[in-house]
Every structure is written in C-alpha cells, then in structure tokens.
Image (cartoon, grey):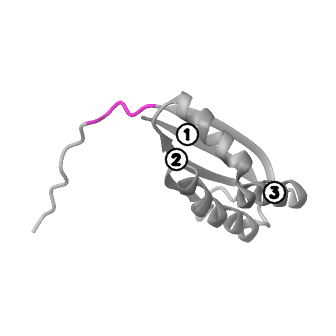
Amino acid sequence: MITCFIRYEIDPFRHETFDAYARVWGQVIPRCGGDLIGYFSPHEGSSTTAYGVYSIPSLAEYEAYRARLREDEQARANFEMARREQFIRREDRIFLRLSSAPHAAVVRAG
C-alpha cells in the first residue's frame, strides 16, 4: 500500500472554494478506487497550506485509478472548476509507504 500526500498552496482568501473542491474529491476518489484519508484545510498557522491524502495498493493501480478519474464526469468538472477559479496556486504530490506499522494499541487512562 502506498499513500499519496498532495500539498496545496491555496489562495488565503478562497478557503471556502477549496473546501467545496475537497468535498467533491470526497465522493470521486472512493468511487474511482482510492482509499481517501481526507482533505485538510487551513485552520491555525499557515493560511495557504492544505493537504489531500489517500492510499492506493500500488503505483500500477494508481495508473488505473488515474484513468478512471479521466473518465469520471464529476472529476473532470472539479479539475475544470479549479482551473477556472485559480484558487490553487501550487500542487505537489509525493507517494510514501507506511514504515511504522504495526502500531501499538492506544491505552487510555481510566
């Protein structure tokens, strides 16, 4: 399993537009085969950094996923909206694998 981390630099005055964009991916990514962890908007600190995070079984499966995105009407409309509205200033993606597993169970004080 690999996880894609997308780092966005967004317009600090367009958070609501980014949130709408993220909600669409919340529907599209799972439908097209990605295991969506979530999209994250600025809350405290930087007002221009946002993230999208999802996992996929392999880079080969990522290519098939990207092909499904190209065919998905809602995905194409979301890409077009982002291009038209220009609220994303920069987008970088990196693919990482989990190195810390297995994780210990959470122990809660009672």
Tell me: residue 74, above or below residue 95: below
Q: Identify the residue position indicated by label 2 in the image.
A: 54
Q: Which mark is residue 82?
A: 3
Q: Majority secondary structure of the magenta segment?
A: loop
Task: Name the N-terminal-most of marks 1 and 2.
Answer: 1
Q: Quadrant of the N terminus?
A: top left
Residue 40: say if magenta. no
Question: In percent of the image, x 60 and y 36: which residue is there?
Answer: 64
Instruction: Rate crowding at label 2 as few (under 14), some (14 to 19) or many (20 or more) other CA atoms within 10 Å.
Output: some
Q: Are marks 1 and 2 in contact (CB under 8 Å)?
A: yes
Q: Amino acid at mark 1?
A: Cys
The residue identified by callout 1 is 4
Residue 27 picture location, percent across and down? 59, 63
Task: Categorize mark 3 by other alpha carbons within 10 Å: few (<14), some (14-19), many (20+).
Answer: some
Q: Quadrant of the C terminus?
A: bottom left
Which amino acid type is shown beneath numbered disc 3? Ala
Q: Upstream in the sequence, badge 3 or badge 1?
A: 1
The picture quadrant where one finds residue 90 is top right
Disc 1 versus disc 2: distance between alpha carbons? 5 Å
Name which residue lies at 57% across and 58% down.
40
Outermost residue to the left: 110
Secondary structure under badge 2? strand
Q: Is residue 37 left or right of residue 23?
A: left
Residue range corresponding to the magenta coloring: 97-101
CA distance for labels 2 and 3: 19 Å
| Depicted 44 relative to depicted 101: above or below | below
Q: Position of residue 89 (x, y in %)?
A: 81, 49
5 relative position to 24: left or right: left
Marks 3/1: CA–CA distance = 19 Å
Q: Is residue 5 above or below residue 31?
A: above
